[in-house]
């Protein structure tokens, strides 16, 4: 599945189902599901990038979640998924950046500047646990799984394993505290193999 890197607070606003538009200077024909990647650097002056209506909506939602400031939002992480369902100019959403233009008879609208494309988004999913320490890229990109299941050897996205020591102090041989597995099924199969 493709991923798109988006600066905070936009990435979280999309994953939480608040922001239904992603604004880009380039058009996309892609339709389908993508990973939402929160970039390593948030938007500069995060509060100033929101208009008053957007700010009030975002603040109300994030305060309900116990986030007092945008700097509490995750960065360098895949935080969820969303569908791209359309790509238009001058969408009616409050999140859509508008492109200036004028009507020139018979309802024909002519753009006066390079267009800002409004990617229409739907069906967002926010992950309970973001996939941390993922380096993003420009445009669409394919994330590389960061873990290998200890049971079935399938590659998957997961949290970095925790270790109790360097592998020599307690005799654990450098194995993680919890097994690195891709599913509940593999977890139980691995435990049964070790008996």
Image (cartoon, helix red, strand yellow):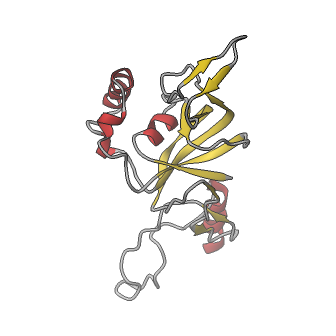
Residue 50 in the figure: left or right of residue 147: left
The structure residue drawn at horizontal position 61% and vertical position 60%, both measured from the top left corner, is 143
Residue 21 vertical position relative to residue 145 in the rendered view, above or below: above
Q: Position of residue 121 (x, y in %)?
A: 61, 32
Which residue is situated farthest in the front direction here?
104
Nearest the eye: 176 or 99? 99
Nearest the eye: 117 or 53? 117
Q: Position of residue 136 (x, y in %)?
A: 51, 59
Residue 103 vertical position relative to residue 182 in the rendered view, above or below: above
Residue 54 in the figure: left or right of residue 28: left
Nearest the eye: 3 or 155? 3
Q: Position of residue 4 (x, y in %)?
A: 57, 50
Which residue is situated farthest in the top direction here?
106
The structure residue drawn at horizontal position 66% and vertical position 72%, both measured from the top left corner, is 193
Which residue is situated farthest in the bottom direction here?
168
Q: Kindly indicate the quadrant of the structure image that contains residue 50.
A: top left
The structure residue drawn at horizontal position 37% and vertical position 49%, both measured from the top left corner, is 42
Which residue is situated farthest in the left direction here?
68
Quadrant assignment for the C terminus? bottom right
Residue 141 vertical position relative to residue 44 in the rendered view, above or below: below
Residue 99 vertical position relative to residue 187 in the rendered view, above or below: above
Residue 154 in the figure: left or right of residue 62: right
Q: Position of residue 44 (x, y in %)?
A: 32, 46
Nearest the eye: 185 or 136? 136
How many marks do you count on the picture? 0
């Amino acid at each position: 599945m493709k991923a798109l890197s988006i600066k905070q607070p936009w990435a979280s606003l999309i994953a939480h189902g608040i922001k239904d538009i992603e604004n880009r200077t380039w058009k996309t024909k892609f339709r389908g599901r993508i990973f939402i990647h929160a970039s390593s650097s948030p938007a500069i002056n995060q509060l100033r990038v929101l208009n008053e209506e957007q700010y009030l909506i975002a603040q109300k939602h994030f305060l309900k979640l116990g986030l007092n400031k945008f700097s509490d939002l995750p960065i360098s992480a895949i935080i969820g998924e969303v569908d791209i369902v359309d790509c238009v100019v001058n969408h009616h959403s409050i999140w859509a950046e508008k492109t200036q233009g004028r009507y020139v008879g018979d309802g024909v609208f002519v753009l006066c500047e390079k267009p800002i494309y409004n990617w229409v988004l739907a069906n967002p999913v926010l992950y309970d646990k973001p996939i941390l320490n993922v380096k993003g890229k420009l445009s669409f990109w394919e994330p590389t799984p960061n873990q290998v299941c200890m049971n079935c050897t399938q590659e998957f996205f997961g949290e970095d394993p925790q270790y109790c020591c360097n592998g020599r102090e307690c005799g654990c041989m450098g194995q993680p505290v919890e097994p690195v597995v891709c599913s509940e099924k593999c977890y139980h199969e691995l435990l049964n193999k070790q008996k």
